[in-house]
Amino acid sequence: MTKTKLAFVLLGVMNLILILMHLTGYFILFFRQTGYMIPLAVDIIILAILGFRSSRYSNRLIIAGLFLSVPFLLMLNLWVQIRDYSYKKIDSPHGQQSLIIEYRDFTLGETTYYYHFYKTIFGFVGKRLDDQSIEMVNYDRGIRLTAEEALGLGREQWITKNIVRFPTWEGMKDIHLAPSRSPVSSADIEAFINMAKNKKNGRTLTVNGNQLEIRYDEMSGQSWIEVTSDGVIPRQQCSRIVPNEESQFYMLEECTHRWEYPLYPMTEGK
């Protein structure tokens, strides 16, 4: 195989990989910040060099192609600058997995905040977490928040190895890096609340790595919820689960170590 054919093959393989990654939701994270300007520039430069070295193509055609492609690259660069996204990586305390946050804000009277999330293992290739993007609007001109402050960056909490909780300006929001192995719904939690009220001893429910078990002592007439967890809620006893309309979370209340813990979003799993 000649050097020219080898260059064409390598260029084709690179482009095919980028296309397949894009179609399957994977991205080279560096290209999320620069767009595909660098791969396009590499294509144009290599094709131009091969064209000038080949006697099959007219130099005029190659020069004309360059005049058409360079303005396209400049427009692409302008589009990247207009998007003006910032990026933040949050490493998991449970291993090599990380969460990449792509975010920006836009002010025109009110301020709108946009956030997209990508999970990554090596910090080089990321997969976009579909249907988990966040958009928030601040209509109060007296409250000035940066995009980082509105999301609660720096105050996030890894609930489990696959769930990150952000204390956003609109309330707590959970980002799931992987589907739950034991999916739970708001209806499941409501049913568990009713069983706890009826003192159904021994009934269990697992929520985001927290195993909840209803306990009832007939001698004293007392009931409680025993909590064991591989997440951030330590082993302890709580009195009840209640829906908190303000935070839009089901809360474990009157627990051994502190008064309450956020358990699960009220709007998920309906």
Image (tube, grey):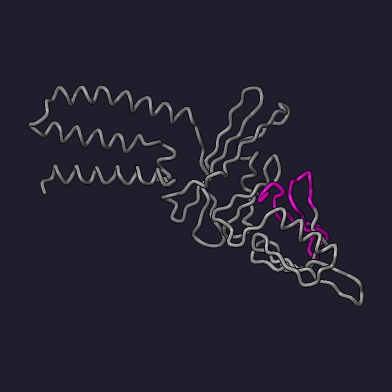
> Is residue 247 highlighted in magenta?
yes
The correct choice, above or below, for 61 with respect to 211 in the image is above
Q: Residue at the spot x=35%, y=34% of the render?
A: 37
Horizontal arrangement in the rendering, residue 190 relative to residue 123 (left or right):
right
Horizontal arrangement in the rendering, residue 178 relative to residue 200 (left or right):
left
Q: Residue furthest bottom?
A: 219
- The magenta region covers 243-270
Q: Residue furthest left?
A: 55
Q: From the top left corner, tell me how far across and down residue 230 is, in percent.
A: 64, 66
> Is residue 108 highlighted in magenta?
no
Q: Residue at the spot x=79%, y=45% of the render?
A: 245
Q: How many marks?
A: 0
Q: Residue at the spot x=62%, y=58% of the render?
A: 183
The correct choice, above or below, for 59 with respect to 134 in the image is above
Q: Residue furthest right?
A: 220
Q: From the top left corner, tell me how far across and down residue 257 is, in percent.
A: 78, 64
Q: From the top left corner, tell me how far across and down residue 188 is, in percent.
A: 71, 58
Q: From the top left corner, tell me how far across and down residue 212 is, in percent.
A: 73, 66
Q: Nearer the viewer, residue 112 or 20?
A: 20
Q: Residue at the spot x=43%, y=45% of the render?
A: 29
Among the 4 quarters of the image, the one containing residue 169: top right
Horizontal arrangement in the rendering, residue 263 relative to residue 164 (left or right):
right
Q: Nearer the viewer, residue 39 or 220?
A: 220
Among the 4 quarters of the image, the one containing residue 192: bottom right
